[in-house]
Amino acid sequence: MNKAHRDTLFVENAEILSHQSHAGDQYLLRVNAPQIAAKALPGSFVHIRCDENRPLRRPISIMRVDARAGWVEFLYKVLGEGTALLAQRQAGEKLSIMGPIGKPFIAHMARPRPLLIGGGVGMPPMLFLADSLRTVKGVYHPFVILGSEVPFPFKAVPSQIMVPGMPAEVIAAMPLLEDWSFASRLASQQGYAGCFEGYVTGLARHWLDALSDEQRAEVEIFSCGPHPMLEAVAALAREYNLPCQVSMEEFMACGVGGCAGCVVEVQTSSGPAMKRVCVDGPVFDAREIFS
């Protein structure tokens, strides 16, 4: 096990508390895993044994935790054999879960207008980050953009929060974020009512262009989603000269830095280097990945 994870990584026999299916082969899973819940940070993920007959675990991002109640929540999409088996598991059953793993997102108080951009199964880390920002009351004023090309795993609501630069027809928001008084908007190319018709970066551009220079200087971008989306988000950050952190998604075997099966090339001050997404990430400075 990688030394960075000693005393912070646990293997829990976690009871499934609830397991809900949503359109687009998406599932919302909540488990009782108090040790993981107590240590998880935004951007952390876990390695789940989906079935006793499939020893190779699957990495899944954490969406929400309640350290006091001890539960951890995940949103995942069925993409192969492992997640298909996981989707069959029922409330009351136990899952072997290892975590929390990875370096988290870090918000900076000098940038109190974070822009959170999540696409598809990259939405969960953005919700975890938004939830964590609530604990620093009155400091952060985030804008959250969520994109999906399958139905969103929640019923969108018309936002009651005004957002500068939004086209008049773009009113769809995530109800949980509305409850937290955090501005959000949804993007899709599927014609969903109230959503921005286009890419998440197009919607982000509307917002950024509506800010003053002083307001834009307070923005830091955080993102998780498919690789092409992250590349586009990194390009947007470069264009507006904004700091940007991205969470990478890669296939993994061990998940704790031993196998080096999830390496990506990273630009460092000493030149290109290979870093492991599981323990050196999954969160990186976008400039290190997309030069």
Image: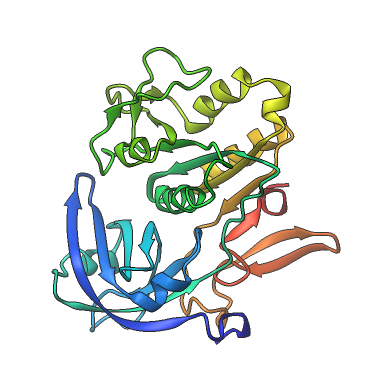
Above or below 91: residue 137: above
**Could you tell me which residue is drawn at 26 percent across and 38 percent down?**
151
**Is residue 14 among what the camera can see?**
yes
- Picture coordinates of residue 142, whole percent (x, y): 52, 37
Asked whether 226 or 283 is in front, the reply is: 283
Q: Is residue 33 left or right of residue 235?
A: left
Residue reaching furthest to the front: 137
**Could you tell me which residue is drawn at 70 percent across and 37 percent down?**
242
- Picture coordinates of residue 228, whole percent (x, y): 53, 43
Which of the 4 quarters of the picture holds residue 147? top left
Which of the 4 quarters of the picture holds residue 215? top right
Above or below 89: residue 144: above
Q: Is residue 213 left or right of residue 257?
A: right
**Could you tell me which residue is drawn at 20 percent across and 44 percent down?**
23
- Picture coordinates of residue 252, whole percent (x, y): 47, 71
Above or below 17: residue 4: below
In which quadrant will I find the N terminus? bottom right
**Is residue 98 among what the camera can see?**
no
Tell me how many marks there are.
Answer: 0
Above or below 212: residue 136: below
Asked whether 187 or 85 is in front, the reply is: 187
Asked whether 115 or 263 is in front, the reply is: 115
Asked whether 204 or 198 is in front, the reply is: 204
- Picture coordinates of residue 152, whole percent (x, y): 28, 39
Q: Is residue 75 left or right of residue 113?
A: left
**Could you tell me which residue is drawn at 25 percent across and 41 percent down?**
154
Rendered image coloring scheme:
rainbow
Residue reaching furthest to the top: 168
Q: Is residue 276 left or right of residue 61?
A: right
